[in-house]
Image: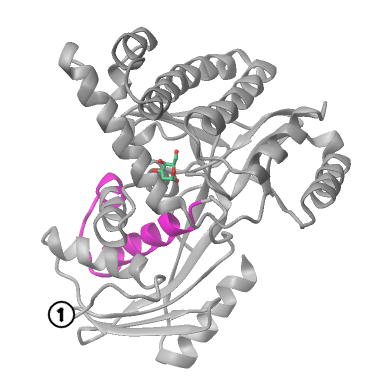
Amino acid sequence: MKNIKQNIIKRYKENFEEEPVIICSPGRVNLIGEHTDYNMGFVLPAAINKAIYIAINKRNDNKISLIAEDLNKKHETDIDSYKYSDDNWPNFVLGVVDQLIKSGNEIGGFNAVISGDVPLGAGMSSSAAMECAVTYSLNHLFNLGLDKLTLVKIAQNAENQFVGLQCGIMDQFASVFGKKDHVIKLDCRSLDYEYVPFNLEGIKIVLFDSMVKHSLASSEYNVRRSQCEEGISIIQNKYPEVKTLRDATIEIVEECLSNSSVDIYNRCKYVVEENDRLINACEDLKKGDIESFGQKMYETHDGLSQLYEVSCPELDFIAAAAKKEEAILGARMMGGGFGGCVIALVKESEIDSVIKRMKDHYFQKLNKGMNVYITQIEDGTRIL
Ligand code: GAF
């Protein structure tokens, strides 16, 4: 972290000859509750000690000058003429500019140097972290007076409207609202949330990175979302009061969807089960029953793999290998899917040997390496 901060300050000063403000916005993990956010259910994420860092300051004109430190790339445009970039990375900044302007906020030009240690495409939500870092920064620099929830919504809209992924609110919410040593139980419909302590004695949150970059993610993600909506519109023929899958029960899914296409039935079944699972998992946490919580993580993996079909052979392999390890209490693929990480709860006393075995198995079976991150739960977006 120290090095990243120093590097971006140095690069900023070299390029723009003034002092920047430094903002840090974390990536996230999600303990349980996957693909439930856009179905208006619950999620259980937390901000982590991997983040996007931005050195930024205002300009006296309308120019936007961006440097992506890790990609060694520059992008220059203007507040009045910015457009979607085929280079992709500037869109996470320009999408925020676009949404701020469209929601009536007055901003001017700015310079920024961006870097970070959230691995790209690994399902830890580097894109949401970048959007939140930019939204927070511009709110701060231009005195926009936006509250935290508005920042989250601007960042989510940037992803939905400008980048084109129809994501839910989880990632941006976790990045901005994260709290050290707590997970956030978020109701994605009311946006009520509760910080649940998650500082388990002797247990670490470990991410096993399959190193598969989720290239299919945005198109297939949007397909999953529309399949859920299709399921709802069928259910509503009989139960008009069911507004989202959050309102459906497993009996309703059976009754209304078992004669529909298998895909629609499976997707909706998974979401309804997952939402129930999360609620029960929170009870496990309250009771301190981590064994039972971990068991539910494995069930989530099976649902995501077999019913929601957003896993891949590498993630399935890691989850199955984790299940055989006595020191791993629970594991499952995390995030949108089609690659990225498996999140696991691992006994600290055996962490080194477990990681070594997992890496060896992965290499033997798939002939490729695997990155492993031992994460800590940290505070959300902040000025450094
Ligand atoms: C991605 C999305 F951005 C989130 O909104 C969420 O739907 C997640 O996939 C799946 O739970 O990270």
Q: Nearer the viewer, residue 21 or 207?
A: 207
Q: How far from the left and from the top, in percent, is residue 238? A: 18, 11
Q: How far from the left and from the top, in percent, is residue 98? A: 21, 66
Q: Kindly indicate the quadrant of the structure image that contains residue 163.
A: bottom left
**Mark 1 = which residue?**
80
Q: Is residue 66 left or right of residue 204?
A: left
Q: Kindly indicate the quadrant of the structure image that contains residue 85.
A: bottom left
Q: Nearer the viewer, residue 145 or 205?
A: 205
Residue 68: in magenta span: no
Residue 151: in magenta span: yes
Most common secondary structure along the magenta stretch: helix
Decide: is 182 above or below 49. Answer: above
Q: In this view, does 205 lie to the left or right of 70?
A: right
Q: How far from the left and from the top, in percent, is residue 107? A: 19, 71
The quarter of the picture where the N terminus appears is bottom right
Type of the residue with mark 1? Asp
Q: Residue at x 55, y 46 (%)?
A: 378
Crowd band around label 1 with a 10 angstrom C-alpha radius: few (<14), some (14–19), many (20+): few
Q: Which of 336 and 149 is in front in this view?
A: 336
Q: Is residue 57 left or right of residue 374?
A: left
Quadrant of picture, ligand 1: top left
Q: Residue at x 18, y 18 (%)?
A: 236
Q: Residue at x 32, y 34 (%)?
A: 227
What is the span of residues highlighted in magenta in the rendered image? 125-152
Decide: is 133 above or below 220. Answer: below
